[in-house]
Image (tube, rainbow, N blue to C red):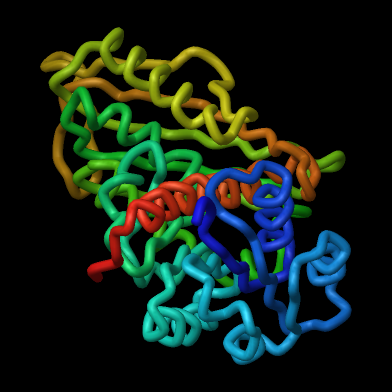
């Protein structure tokens, strides 16, 4: 076996973009099934046109497919609520689950930060679009300094925020803030999402603020730039909007933080933009593109492990 058979649950924007990426840029996975609940959905139609088996009967339809016993990895691009049901069924059947919803059942996973750390988990969670874009930057600062606080603001086009995104705004902020701490390494994290109604639509833009000590500006800048290059390996449209900005606080100009007292150290501001690859979604939907690209990159790490004969232990 040279490739691991994989399936996608969810035939909406995210599931369809992931499907196109897996077909267009094959590595060590073979997409053999796409699952939806609407027989007439564009995603299922596109899958059939490309010779991929489909079902509109949800996870029950997937389990009924002849190829189901051979599937090793399943990507879930549905909703946080639905994923809880899917996860229980899939893991009971020994499937490796990659969760693109905010359910956060499995460990938070950012390929460039901790992709190798969670490969023995039965379920890995891709956090959120804002998390995939900004947590690498928080982690870059944390790798060279002590980060006391990190705040991210993710601004995405209103057009690229579908019903699932809008219904999961609360999960987005909680999940992203939690991952800023657990994966990014900040002592405290905060996340904000803005749905930008501008026309024509603007690409995803993110602002990352950190308060840190223990490293100088040049060390932080170098770490950030190195991390940007790592993310660009699977998201070419990921880039710094401008030079990293710094503000230093010392004994003579301490920063007062409500509820946290006075801070001395370096405030870092990182401005990002994420342009989508345009595989299925328009280029302005960088928020969705980075999720599917990160999920595919994570799936490839998991497939490599499976092909090496290693089994899931959790």
Which is nearer the eye, 9 or 155? 9
Q: Is residue 223 above or below residue 104?
A: above
Q: From where the camera sits, is residue 7 visible? A: yes
Report if residue 178 is visible in the image: no
Q: As drawn, is 118 to the left or to the right of 271?
A: left
Direction front: furthest residue: 1
| Among the 4 quarters of the image, the one containing residue 225 | top left
For image coordinates 78% across by 54% down, the residue present is 159
Lateral position of residue 291 relative to residue 123, left or right: right
Identity of the residue drawn at 45% across and 87% down? 89
Please tell me which residue is depicted at 57% across the width and 24% down the height of the picture: 239
Horizontal side of 276 relative to 213 (left or right) equals right
Q: Is residue 271 left or right of residue 187?
A: right
Residue 78, image x, y percentages = 60, 73
Q: Residue lying farthest top?
A: 218
- Image quadrant holding the C terminus, namely bottom left
Above-or-below relation of 163 to 294: below
The front one of 72 and 230 is 72
Q: How many marks?
A: 0
> x, y (%) of residue 289?
65, 46
At 76% from the left and 44% from the top, the residue drawn is: 279
> Percent position (x, y) of residue 152?
43, 42
**Front in this rendered view, residue 272 or 300:** 300
């Amino acid at each position: 076996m040279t490739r691991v058979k994989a399936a996608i649950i969810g035939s909406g924007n995210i599931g369809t973009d992931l499907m196109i990426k897996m077909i267009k840029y094959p590595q060590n996975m073979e997409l053999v099934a796409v699952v939806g609940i609407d027989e007439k959905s564009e995603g299922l139609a596109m899958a059939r046109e490309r010779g991929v088996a489909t079902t509109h009967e949800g996870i029950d339809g997937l389990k009924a497919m002849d190829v189901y016993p051979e599937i090793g990895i399943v990507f879930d691009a549905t909703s946080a609520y639905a994923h809880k049901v899917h996860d229980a069924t899939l893991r009971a059947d020994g499937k490796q689950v990659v969760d693109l919803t905010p359910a956060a059942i499995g460990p938070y996973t950012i390929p460039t930060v901790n992709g190798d750390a969670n490969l023995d988990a039965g379920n890995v969670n891709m956090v959120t679009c804002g998390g995939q874009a900004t947590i690498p930057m928080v982690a870059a600062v944390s790798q060279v300094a002590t980060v006391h606080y990190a705040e991210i603001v993710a601004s995405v086009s209103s057009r690229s925020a579908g019903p699932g995104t809008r219904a999961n705004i609360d999960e987005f902020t909680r999940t992203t803030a939690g991952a800023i701490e657990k994966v990014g390494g900040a002592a405290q994290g905060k996340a904000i999402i803005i749905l930008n109604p501008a026309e024509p639509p603007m690409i995803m833009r993110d602002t990352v603020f950190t308060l840190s000590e223990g490293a100088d500006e040049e060390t932080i800048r170098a770490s950030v730039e190195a991390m940007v290059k790592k993310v660009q390996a699977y998201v070419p449209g990921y880039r710094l909007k401008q030079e990293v900005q710094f503000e230093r606080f010392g004994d003579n100009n301490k920063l007062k933080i409500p509820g946290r007292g006075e801070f001395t150290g370096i405030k870092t501001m990182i401005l990002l933009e994420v342009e989508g690859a345009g595989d299925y979604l328009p280029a302005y939907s960088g928020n969705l593109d980075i999720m599917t690209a990160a999920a595919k990159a994570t799936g490839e790490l998991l497939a490599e492990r499976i092909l090496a004969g290693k089994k899931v232990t959790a």
